[in-house]
Every structure is written in C-alpha cells, then in structure tokens.
Image (tube, rainbow, N blue to C red):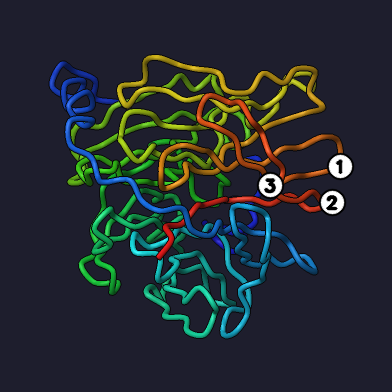
Amino acid sequence: MRARAVLRWTTRGSVTVGVLAACLVLADVAETTPRGVNGRIAYVNEVADKPQLFTIRPDGTERARVRGAVRWAGNPDWAPDGRSIVAEVETASGAGVSLIAPDGSTVRNLTPKGYQGQPSFSPDGRWIVLERDPKPGDNGVWLMRRDGSGLRRLTRNPFMVAGGECGCDTDPNFSPNGRLITFVRVKQDELLSALFVTRRDGTGLRQLTPYTWGVGIKHDWSPDGRRIVLTVNAHQVQPDVSANIVTIRPDGSGRVDLTRFTGGTRHAFAGSFSPDGKQIALRLEDGGRYSLAVMDTDGRNVRKLFTGSVPPVTIDWGTGR
C-alpha cells in the first residue's frame, strides 16, 4: 500500500468455487445481528490536499471535523457500540491502523510498523480485519484483535507485483453474524476488480461478481445479512458509462440496480447501510459537484445532506447511543 494508501482509497476508485463454499454463503443469512439505532455518518474530505475525517448527523446537521489528536485519517469504520472509530492513518514511516475517539481526543496506533489500512470491526467489536502489505508484492487481507495483537493472514492477492500499484485485496468487511469476510480483489488497478468472500479463517474463498463489473473499493452488508451494496463501473474506463449502485445477495446472485445514471457525467458511489437497515448513505457526482446523500434501500427518496466541490468518500454510518 505504500505512502499512497489513503489517497488510493479516496479515489474512485485463483478462486476455489464449490458446492460447500456456495452453501456456506447461502447459510450466512440464517443468523444475523440485531438492527441498530442510526447515529452519525463518518466520511473523508480532502482539506489542503490531506484527507480529513468528518462526521455528520443523518439529517445533515452538526457537520464536524474530527480534530483533537487526529492530524489526518481515511477509511473510517464505526465500532458496533458507536464509541470509537477505526481508521487508516499515514506517517512518514508507513501507513497504519488506529483507534480514534469520535471527538478526536484520543488516537491509539495499533500497527506502528509496516503498511496496512482499510480496517473494519467484527460485529462483536473484538476483532479488526484489514488490508496489509508485509513486504513489497505481498498484499492480502489480515485479521487482528482490537488491541492489535494476534495478527494473522487470511488472503494473498495473486496479482500483486513488487513496486506495482495493484493487485490488492482491499476493503474487507465482516458479515453481520461474523462468519464471513467479503473484500474487493483488484486484478488490474483502476480497471478490473471483483467482490470475493472467505470464511473468517481464510478458507472457502469464492468470487461473487465478475471482474468486468469494475467493482468500487467501498461496499457494505445490510444489517440483516441478506444484501450487499456496492458500486459497478466505478473505474469508468469508458467515459460515457456512469458509475451506479447495486445490491446483490451474499451468494452473488439477485443483482438489483438502485441507481441508473447514464452518459458518464452523473455517478453514484456506495457508502454504507444505515444501522436500522432502512437507508443507504452514498456519494453523488454531477460534473464537478459532489454530494453526501442518503436514500431508501430500494433507491427511492434520495436526499442530499450537503453539496460541495470536494467528494465525500469512504462513507460509514455509525450506530447511535
């Protein structure tokens, strides 16, 4: 991930398949975590060419930059209890993962050495899954305890080359019952990417979407475990093709298009489901204008929270307390 880790995530930007793996994915919806109360939405804006962490209420009020001990951070993920945020930070010596208080008053670096990012919590808040480069050309998804201990590898991207931009296995997310982890596998940077799933021990790797979908880095599970929201055509290789938001079932079937922009000038990018499972936070793009918005899970009732000249990225909706 090198020093460009945070900035890469803020842009738009061999598989074992078998009956057992397919049954595992389908069975995942049987047990789910309870729905939560909607809290604040976290996102990242660039300020003076540095990614800065912000939060906002879902009605568009009380927009605030997370200051305090936070200099700059990206790729936030709320803890299940809404009391902390895990995020990617970058220093002169590398990129790491830190626990951050929502007001920025405390920052705890969990990975002081090496290059890692794209963290997210397990549903019980005891584990963090992340992307990690232990050495050049050795990218993959890893798992560690909330305190940074017990680090172990789950996947290895087969397309990563030393000194290259990607392949990468990125944006790992737990299923609501904690049994599975989905992630985006980048085969060719800014061109070919697909959604994959694995068990939390790294077995049962399975591809859920074609590489030709051009899946965006950010995706999220619905609280009931029945749908995954993601962005297709995110890389916009063809200038006249728009990025749009879709949902799929956990086995990769049942695609539903929630937005239907065409022409390559207007786009929609997935953020995350609301904790109550009734809405989705997203980014809208129209020329040089960018909006943080929310919509119903069927794609209706789109409501913009704010619009500006800087895109709000890596959007995550936290639980209220």
Density class for disc 1 (Cα within 10 Å; few <14, some 14-19, many ≥20) is few
The reply to whether the C-beta atoms of the residues labelled 1 and 3 are less than 8 Å apart is no
Q: Quadrant of the C terminus?
A: bottom left
Separation (CA) of disc 2 from disc 3: 11 Å
Given this view, does label 1 or label 3 mark the residue nearer the observer? 3
Badge 1 element = loop
Density class for disc 2 (Cα within 10 Å; few <14, some 14-19, many ≥20) is few
Please give the label number shown on residue 288: 1
Residue 275, relative to residue 108: is it above or below?
Answer: above
The reply to whether the C-beta atoms of the residues labelled 2 and 1 are less than 8 Å apart is yes
Q: Disc 3 marks which amino acid?
A: Leu
Separation (CA) of disc 1 from disc 3: 14 Å
Instruction: Choose the circle earlier in sequence order: 2 or 1.
Output: 1
Left-right relation of 46 to 15: right
- Where residue 215 appears, x then y in whole percent? 53, 30
The residue shown at (48%, 39%) is: 219
Left-right relation of 36 to 230: left
The residue shown at (84%, 43%) is: 289
The residue shown at (32%, 28%) is: 226
The residue shown at (40%, 53%) is: 37
Residue wearing tag 3: 292
- Where residue 234 appears, x then y in whole percent? 63, 31
Separation (CA) of disc 2 from disc 1: 6 Å
- Where residue 129 appears, x then y in whole percent? 33, 55
Residue 232, relative to residue 309: is it above or below?
Answer: above
Q: Disc 1 marks which amino acid?
A: Gly
Please give the label number shown on residue 309: 2
Badge 3 element = strand
- Where residue 40 appears, x then y in whole percent? 53, 60
Left-right relation of 125 to 120: left
